[in-house]
Image (cartoon, rainbow, N blue to C red):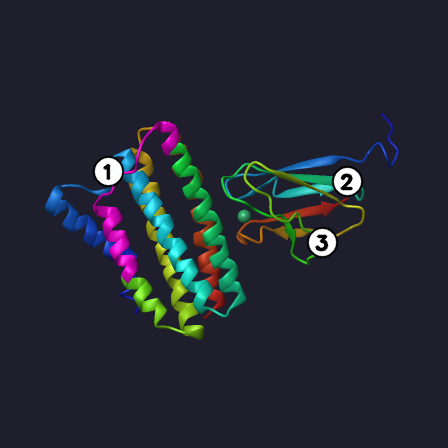
Amino acid sequence: MTSKLNLAAVVLIAITTGCAAIAKTPAELNDLELAHVAYTADVIDIRYAHLALAISENPAIHEFANSMVRDHTAVNEQALALLEKLGAQPVDNFLSQSLTTNSEGIIDSLSQLRGADFDKAYAANEWEYHKAVNDLMENAFIPNIENPEVKSLFEAGLVIFKAHEQHAEMMVKAVQ
Amino acid sequence: MTSNADSSIKDHLVEISGAAFLPAKLLIKVGDSVTWINKDIVPHTATAVDGSWDTGFIGSGEERRVVFDGEKGSAYICTYHPSMTAVLEFD
Ligand SMILES: [Cu+2]
């Protein structure tokens, strides 16, 4: 279970295979590809949250999941508004695709769990997921974004996602 | 300048920015009010840990004011992001 839920490892595999195939790393993605990755990462977390709202009976998990839906939806609305203002479209890429494929496996695994088993696995995955995505945003994406407005939206998102990471860590400890 | 109870009543400002309350510690008097302004891109709340007061939902770019007509719970959090904590201290 734990290894299936290890997003960081999957991202690393994606990076390595991506390197071999098309000589691209996350740091080499352009602004419109990065916008696509960020949008995809938001959509994935919203999907995890909807799964939690459907399966979990724990009110604290529901509150956390509602915050994920509320915030990732708000950030994506701002991202779409900015892209529209810039007259640009997000561009699909290897990292968006591997994040989506990986999330489908995680949703499969999570959806087979019930009760405390689900709550523990969901909280652990949220903590891992936010750590991995925040690390990518901070170290690979933000330093390489060219458009200042896109950059400031990523920075504003990161500070919120770091609060999610802390909240997820609190959840992991609470459901143990 | 001398001041009586009425003229000393103040409205304090707390900015919510970067998933934090600024300032995180605010000294107020009974009768004062506090306005929270949300400069983040997501909604927040300012909610007493003991439940004695609550701004409710503060959308991005919005503000909410609470009048403290008595000494109330001083520790508060954002219920959406419980890692956000702050304190009101009553003088
Ligand atoms: Cu908040």
Residue A85 shows in this picture: yes
**Circles 1 and 2 on the same subunit:** no
Q: Nearer the viewer, residue A73 or B25?
A: A73
- Please give the name of the residue rendered at 64% of the width and 49% of the height, measured from the top-left corner: B56
Dominant secondary structure, magenta:
helix
The answer to if B49 sits in the magenta stretch is: no
Label ID, residue B73: 3
A60 is higher (above) or lower (below) than B38: below
Residue A168: image location, x then y, percent: 45, 58
- Judged from this view, the residue extending furthest toward the left is A20
Identify the secondary structure beneath mark 1.
loop
* Residue beneath disc 1: A29
Sort mark 1 into few (<14), some (14-19) or many (20+) by Cα contacts within 10 Å: many
Dot 3: few (<14), some (14–19), or many (≥20) neighbours within 10 Å? Answer: some
The residue that label 2 is drawn on is B32
Could you tell me which residue is drawn at 29 percent across and 34 percent down? A31
Picture quadrant where residue A137 is located: top left
Q: Chain of mark 2?
A: B
Task: Please indicate whether residue A103 sits to the left or right of residue A63 in the image.
Answer: left
Task: Please report the bounds of the magenta region as a residue range.
Answer: A83-104
Secondary-structure class at tag 3: loop
Instruction: Check disc 1 and give the amino acid type.
Output: Leu
Q: CA distance from mark 3 to mark 2?
A: 14 Å
